[in-house]
Amino acid sequence: MLRREVLRKQARNVVYYVHCYMAKEAEEGVHNVKQIQQRTAEATQTSTVTVRRIVKEAKANDMCKITRTPGKKRLKRKRVTGFDNSELGAIKRFIHTFHLTCNEFPTVSKLLPQLQSKFNFKGAAGSVRRIVKSMGFRWKRTEDKNRILIEKSNIRLKRIEYLFQLQQYCEQGRNIVYSDELYLERAVEQKAASKSQRVVAIHAGSEAGFIPNALLVAESHDDYSNISDDVYFDWLQNKLIPNLPPRSVVVVDTASPHDKEYDPAPSSNAKRSDMTAWLDQKGIHYTPDMYKPQLYQLINENKDRFKILALDKMLTDSGHDVLRIPAHHPDLNPIEMAWAAIKTYVTSKTKEFNVSKVNDFVKEKIDAIGPEEWKKMCQEVREIEDSYRNNELIIDTLSETIVAGDMDSSSESEDSDTSLSSDEDK
């Protein structure tokens, strides 16, 4: 069967207006009322079903829907999540111990009432599914054919390695410094597009408090969500590094520009001279008769051995080390708690978004967060770290019951217990 043609906005209006004209004729006794839809369909070369649907939509929606093209992409409302980074971390840890706390394995339908009662969650099951998926959980089948949520193995591995390395640094008496960026923005509608007024703050701190003279607060004119590389590395070179205690360990997340490469390997589109220069510099043998694809294959096979990140080089050259928090774990960074407090403070102070005032309020709140509060935030993160360490054995025990790989979307949709993604958000 051929797919029916979608009537666009103007065509749908024409159908409706023709129908209205013929309805008026019928009222005046020119034609039979029962033939209005049939005559409209013939006049507009559509089906009576289409005419009936357009008329019904017009009556129900006051002409709102018939002036819109069906299937046209439009801005969708933001789906319900309602959690900040610290709450997402609490949910992650709650899922890890769900079968001990609730005496059953975690599924979406079982998590929903728990999230509603413990975290005041306002969404429905579809939002729960999106949240747990964004945190790195997937559905797996157990020996008794239940489908449960369990964290992906590579995410666990990154967390285990991070916690192990962090513990080693702490045992060495190293100063652990946490850094991050804060974005405060307001959307501004313009004729051509939607842009944002954005204030960005970059800072770092440890149990002793914020690093003195390391704060950068500025208006961002970048249309991207992340801060530009130039601004970040200028802050690193001129504000953070000069004020760091000796032999510090700087903790960052995995967002750009933290992963920008220093002296990256040539791409497949690079000039032949650039490829050979890189191979010569690294001492990798090649022959003069090799073509560019062969040279690039050599580069591709060896580039990971020589990969150096710009952030790591700048800090190690200054006598410091870098430690990266694994993805999906913002709760392991105490500065996230400081950012949450700052956002709340700024929101309470600003009725209208004014860049200059927002800058001042950010600085005010940062000055008010002293060493004692930082110490409490770091202690809370230490407890979270211990919680993750204690949960690893629990997850191992749970994973022993797994007999199949990740569930695909079709398999999930067959399970009435977990396939709730079609539920509408409340």
Image (spheres, rainbow, N blue to C red):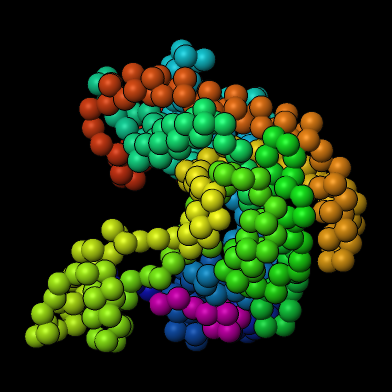
Q: Is residue 402 above or below residue 224?
A: above
| Residue 161 appears in the figure | yes
Q: Is residue 55 above or below residue 131?
A: below
Residue drawn at x 50%, y 86% is 43
Residue 126, magenta (yes or no) = no
Residue drawn at x 47%, y 31% is 168
Quarter location, residue 373: top right
Nearest to the observer: residue 173 or residue 406:
173
Indicate the quadrant containing the C terminus: top left, top right, bottom left or bottom right: top right
Nearest to the observer: residue 348 or residue 322:
322
Magenta span: 5-13
Residue 140 is left or right of residue 24, and the answer is left
Residue 147 is left or right of residue 50, and the answer is left
Percent coordinates x, y for residue 191 in the rendering = 72, 82
Residue drawn at x 52%, y 31% is 172
Residue drawn at x 70%, y 52% is 243
Residue 7, magenta (yes or no) = yes
Q: Is residue 90 above or below residue 230?
A: above
Percent coordinates x, y for residue 186 in the rendering = 76, 64
Nearest to the observer: residue 231 or residue 103:
231
Residue 68 is left or right of residue 419, and the answer is right
Indicate the quadrant containing the N terminus: top left, top right, bottom left or bottom right: bottom left
Percent coordinates x, y for residue 109 in the rendering = 49, 29
Residue 31 is left or right of residue 269, and the answer is right
Total numbered labels placed on residues in the image: 0
| Residue 183 appears in the figure | no
Percent coordinates x, y for residue 105 in the rendering = 41, 21
